[in-house]
Image (tube, rainbow, N blue to C red):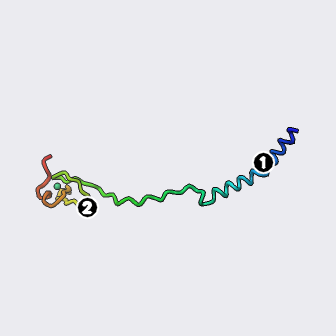
Amino acid sequence: MLKYLLIGVLVIWLLYSPLLKRMRQLRRDHPASRPATRPSPPPAAQVEDMVACAHCGVHLPASEACLDAAQRPYCCAAHRDAGPSAH
Ligand SMILES: [Zn+2]
């Protein structure tokens, strides 16, 4: 009696498991069931190197720095003319 029950369960399982697998696959393939992919973050603003003024130490983007003959960065022409500070 138990043998027939086990065989019956096995037969039912064999019949239904491919069906369940297929259903699971279909559900997984469905775009709505997919976890929402986060929108990619906006591209970061162009990161620019920061340099410190050789005279006063203020930081500024490298592209805005005034360079002297020795390629030292300065925040402005006045500080470039004044030269690097002692400290
Ligand atoms: Zn300066």
Q: Residue furthest top?
A: 2
* Ligand 1 quadrant assignment: bottom left
Find residue 80 and report its image quarter.
Answer: bottom left
Outermost right residue: 1
Is residue 33 shown left or right of residue 51?
right
The quadrant in which residue 41 appears is bottom left
Residue 31 drawn at (x, y percent): 60, 60
> Callout 2, which amino acid?
Ser
Q: Where is residue 64 drawn, in percent x and y?
A: 23, 61
Disc 2 target residue: 63
Instruction: Kindly state the secondary structure of the residue where label 1 is placed.
Output: helix
Percent coordinates x, y for residue 69 in the rendering: 17, 59
From the viewer's perspective, is 77 left or right of 5?
Answer: left
The x, y position of residue 38, in whole percent, is 49, 57
**Residue on which disc 1 sits:** 13
- Is disc 1 surrounded by few (<14), some (14 to 19) or many (20+) residues within 10 Å? few
